[in-house]
Image (cartoon, rainbow, N blue to C red):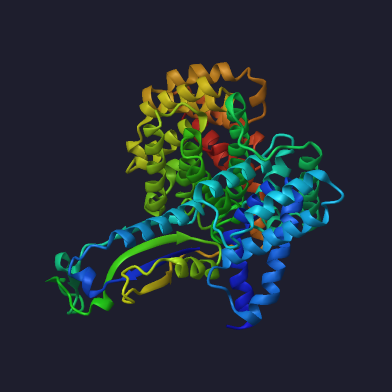
Amino acid sequence: MSAADTHRTIEAIWRIESSKIIAYLTRMVRDIGLAEDLAQDALIAALERWPNDGIPDNPGGWLMTAAKRKALDLLRRNKVRDRKYELLGREMDARMDSEMEVPETGEVNDDLLRLIFMTCHPVLSPEARVALTLRLLGGLTTAEIARAYLVPEPTIAQRIVRAKRTLSATRVAFEIPQGTELKPRLASVLEVIYLMFNEGYAASSGSQWIRPLLCQEALRIGRVLAEIAPTEAEVHGLVALMEFQSSRFKSRVNAQGEPVLLMDQNRALWDYLLIRRGFAALERIEQLGGMTGPYAIQAAISACHAGAPSAAETDWIRISALYEALAQVSPSPIVELNRAVALSMAFGPEIGLEIVDILRSEPALKGYHLLPSVRGDMLFKLGRLDEAGAEFKLAASLTDNQRERALLLDRAAESLRAAP
Amino acid sequence: MRFMMIVKATEDSEAGVLPSAEQLDAMMRYNMELARAGVLLAADGLHPSSGAIRISYPEPGGKPKITDGPFTEAKELIAGYTLIEVKTREEAIEWAKRMPDPHGFGAGQIELRQIFEPTELTQDPEAQAKQYEMREHIQRQNP
């Protein structure tokens, strides 16, 4: 094996092992920044030794042991200075009796869960949470994160340093939130993962088809979370939603790199392995007592599309009911607009139009081109062609997307031509 | 990138001998490890080739020829597969190395094959500009 090969192998091992090591060390030294530094020291030791000595049989165990030793050295050095460290040091001395002990699976799971609750703590800004989670749970380098976000590396580096400092300064505990605290904290974790996913999803494009690191990493961290927090239905909901959305990567943009609407996508290009995984995640939600959370409901909506053999066979009645349920748990004007579209597809444009007309006075949708676009479509179907033409024109004036503007202007012309 | 870890068949697996409790346990633990790392996509074991059917096209443009199993040359047959999604080829190798010997007795063989995927991340600035343009548009279309 050449030095470069060994180096790449060490990187791969690091990606597999680093989050577990950092989680363990954080529990040991009670400081996330210090834990990462110590884990990095272990990595450096591996980079120095393995090219000559060869890669050990149990590289994960080697790294964990090296990291623990470094932590222990530090605790001993600080003994005199700090009584808290002295106690920790003594505790660790006892534990280090069996050097290569592999932590129990349950213990590792809990540590990882504590770590993710920490990196997604609400005391941090959403951007900081995403960056820190990618770094510590994803094992991505600062350079990789910067490239994924198309920002300079020092920006990300600074964001991570500040985040770690904030966590220390505010004494955020390394623990799994209990009782009433759990739900909002879990929501914050899911929000971070979905934010990461959407960032990647929105950035991927057509002919140079991109499989953005961010999407893949969000989905991977979501899948990890589903294993270490298997009883949380919303975790499976988010995973299912991401599996379904990822299944449409290839079909969601055409060869020119332009977006293709869900109803117009070539379903043969969908990834049925991911769709199957999405349905499996929904099944786990059923076993946990059914879907009541916003991610689970959105996933169920996505499943209606994934399960329809063709756009014409979409079960719009079920989708309408699911948007109704979504509006109950997570009301927003966008959800209402989607509900109106679903109702119009299921029961005819009159019913959809009633809701859309109410939404016209909604300040949050002011200037949002899809509102007049949807309204124009409903009016067109009702034969109110002059009004439809005016709505399409309005929608065209509100979008920045050239191709979309052209399409909307075409529809406006078509409506006005057909008008008596 | 996705990889398939193909477990080759052995005389035992072809004879329908089921894995021992220890082997099953080791494989289960390995699959759990893959799942907990978020890299496992699918894993399945296959029936022996005695129940298999082979379809071939001996004549160009001709009708398919159907041959019933079993087939000989156990090492050319497969007994199961595990699909993983990882960031690098080295990561796939590292996971494959950790798979327990699937048959025991030194007879196990695992083949690692990369799955075809559309082109990877582009650095083309024009394409990136286009992504930005689309970003808001697509975000509003989801789910």
Q: Quadrant of the rendered structure where residue B10 is?
A: bottom left
Q: Is residue A260 visible?
A: no
Can residue A115 be seen at all in this image of the molecule? yes
Q: Residue at coordinates 54% horizontally, 56% vertically from top-left?
A: A206
Relative vertical location of residue B103 with respect to residue A386 in this rendering, above or below: below
Q: Quadrant of the N terminus of chain A?
A: bottom right
**Residue displayed at 72% across by 68% down:** A44
What percent of the width, then of the height, locates residue A319?
Answer: 41, 29
Relative image position of residue A64 (x, y in whole percent) = 62, 61
Q: Nearer the viewer, residue A376 or A12?
A: A12
Q: Residue at coordinates 48% horizontally, 56% vertically from top-left?
A: B39
On the image, the x and y values in percent for residue B12 come to: 22, 71
Q: Residue at x 62, y 63 (%)?
A: A14
Q: With B118 as the anchor, is A403 left or right in this view? A: right
Residue occupying the far right of the picture: A81
Q: Is residue A269 left or right of residue A242?
A: left
| Image: A54 above or below A86 | below
Q: Is residue B105 above or below residue A92?
A: below
Q: Nearer the viewer, residue B104 or A187?
A: B104
Front residue of A267/A361: it is A267
Number of marks present in the image shown: 0
Residue B26 horizontal/vertical position (percent) = 38, 60
